[in-house]
Image (cartoon, rainbow, N blue to C red):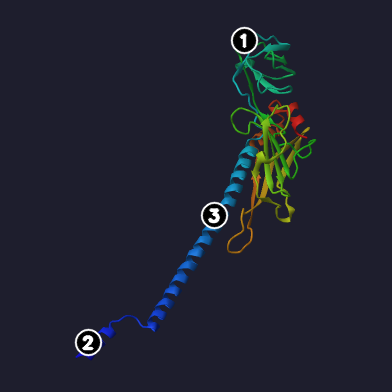
């Protein structure tokens, strides 16, 4: 009776050594599998984050480039302008409500209706708010003064002195659609890994030096086959060269190495057909022999090109 009782206690005493070893082995296999899966998921998330950061940066840069190239060449006045004095036919100096955005050589539309005409500003007095031009018609105080057309060199051609190049894109006009004209330079510096955007008023007295504050992309790399960042399609009509298409090619690198391949990843983004629509429009006008809507390059912009 005592032996039977002892046997029952022994049978319920716990796992054997072999059973424990097998259990531990199973747990190790399961734990290892789960840990490997977690590590794989973590690396996959890091890879995805790395690529997302790369794509996001170059996408933002190319969207801005596409917008500003598309708007390049747009001419505008920042305020509604009217005459504040009467005008008689012939060469005359007349007062206006504002000369902001005006420059010597600009073609201004004066008047309305049957007496509307386009005149060329031969002088602009910023202190006295006056313009000088030769008028065909008489105009009264309060008549509108506007500007129409676009800049022939809104994207500065490669043939111009200090013009655009394969690594430096130069453009100007109301590129932001806010009636304020600016001059903008994009500089590809693949050697140092930066794409710079330098923007200033079109009549700024000087150009800011390129520096860290102007970096638009900081992971730029050389394009495959050393393809230039910017290439241009140019049309010549008369004395003007019109850039009617800009191709943009940018290659960027991930900020960190891929955790799986231990390599940096590269992506090349190409915009092959970005048309500056304002320049395209005045090129078509020039091709049709209409020249009173073709605005010359302001002297102030010429000083910013070097």
Label 3 sits on residue = 49
Label 1 sits on residue = 141
**Between marks 1 and 3 in the image, the one whose residue lies nearer the viewer:** 3
Picture quadrant where residue 120 is located: top right
Q: Separation of disc 1 and disc 3 at Cα? A: 63 Å
Give the vertical position of 79 relative to 24 (above or below): above
Percent x, y of residue 144: 61, 17
Which residue is located at x 60 percent, y 12 percent?
A: 142
- Closer to the chain start, of discs 1 and 3, is 3
Which residue is located at x 28 percent, y 82 percent?
A: 12
Percent x, y of residue 89: 71, 11
- In the displayed structure, does residue 259 sit left or right of residue 223? left
State yes or no: discs 2 and 1 in contact (Cβ < 8 Å). no
Label 2 sits on residue = 5
Residue 297 visible at all: no
- Closer to the chain start, of discs 2 and 3, is 2
Q: Which mark is residue 291?
A: none
């Amino acid at each position: 009776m005592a032996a039977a009782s002892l046997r029952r206690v022994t049978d319920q005493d716990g796992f054997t050594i072999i059973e424990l070893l097998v259990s531990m082995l199973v747990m190790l296999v399961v734990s290892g599998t789960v840990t490997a899966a977690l590590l794989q998921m973590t690396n996959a998330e890091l890879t995805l984050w790395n690529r997302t950061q790369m794509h996001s940066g170059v996408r933002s840069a190319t969207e801005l480039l596409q917008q500003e190239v598309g708007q390049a060449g747009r001419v505008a006045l920042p305020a509604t302008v009217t005459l504040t004095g009467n005008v008689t036919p012939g060469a005359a100096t007349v007062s206006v409500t504002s000369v902001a955005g005006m420059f010597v050589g600009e073609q201004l539309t004066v008047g309305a209706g049957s007496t509307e005409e386009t005149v060329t500003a031969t002088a602009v007095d910023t202190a006295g708010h006056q313009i000088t031009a030769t008028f065909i018609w008489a105009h009264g105080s309060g008549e509108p003064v506007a500007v129409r057309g676009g800049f022939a060199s809104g994207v500065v051609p490669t043939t111009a002195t200090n013009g655009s190049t394969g690594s430096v894109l130069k453009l100007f006009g109301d590129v932001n659609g806010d009636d304020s004209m600016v001059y903008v330079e994009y500089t590809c510096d693949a050697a140092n890994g930066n794409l710079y955007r330098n923007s200033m008023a079109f009549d700024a007295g000087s150009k800011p030096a390129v520096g860290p504050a102007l970096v638009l992309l900081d992971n730029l790399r050389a394009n495959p086959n050393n393809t230039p960042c910017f290439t241009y399609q140019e049309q010549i009509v008369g004395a003007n060269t019109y850039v009617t298409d800009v191709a943009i090619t940018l290659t960027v690198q991930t900020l960190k190495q891929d955790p799986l391949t231990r390599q940096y990843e590269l992506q090349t983004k190409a915009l092959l057909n970005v048309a500056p629509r304002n320049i395209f429009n005045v090129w078509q006008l020039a091709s049709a022999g209409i020249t009173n809507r073709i605005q010359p390059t302001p002297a102030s912009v010429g000083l910013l090109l070097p």
